[in-house]
Image (cartoon, rainbow, N blue to C red):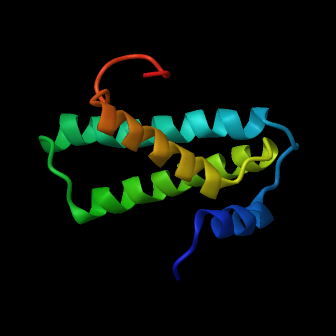
Amino acid sequence: MALTFSEYQKESRKTAVYPRGIIYPALGLGGEAGEVLEKIKKIIRDREGKVDAEVLEKISKELGDVLWYIAQLCTELGLDMEEVARKNLEKLFSRKERGVLKGEGDER
C-alpha cells in the first residue's frame, strides 16, 4: 500500500495515545533514533559490518518508529510532513547546485 507522507501523518495520528504537546514525541524521536544507532553499532561490533535480512528487518522497524514520532511531532507543531519533505529536498538541491553539500552551518 503506497502512502504519501500526508496520508501517513493522518493515519498514524489514529494510534497516537499520549499527553498532547511536543515533549512526548520529541523525546520519543530521540529514543527511537538511538535504537537505530544501537542496531548499527552492533552490526559493527558483532557482525563485522555485514547486514543480513534479519538485521535489516530490525532496523526497518526502528526506522518506522522514528517516522511515527516525526509524524506526531509535525502534527503537534502544525506542520505537514509532505511540505517538510519538499522543503528539505529544495534545500538539499540548492546546496548541491551551489556546491555546498559539504561543510558546516544551516544557512549554506
Please state if 41 lies on the left or on the right of 38 as rendered. left
Q: Residue furthest left?
A: 48
**Residue, x 85% and y 38% (percent of image)?**
21
Q: Quadrant of residue 26?
A: top right
In the rendering, at what x and y percent does residue 16 appear? Answer: 78, 57
Please state if 64 lies on the left or on the right of 95 as rendered. right
Is 4 situated above or below 30? Answer: below
In the rendering, at what x and y percent does residue 62 appear? Answer: 48, 52
Please state if 93 lies on the left or on the right of 11 as rendered. left
* Camera-side residue of 85 and 55: 85
* Camera-side residue of 37 and 76: 76
* Camera-side residue of 69 and 53: 69
Is 1 situated above or below 56? Answer: below
**Residue, x 71% and y 43% (percent of image)?**
73
**Residue, x 49% and y 21% (percent of image)?**
107
* Camera-side residue of 91 and 77: 91
Q: Residue furthest top?
A: 104
Number of callouts: 0
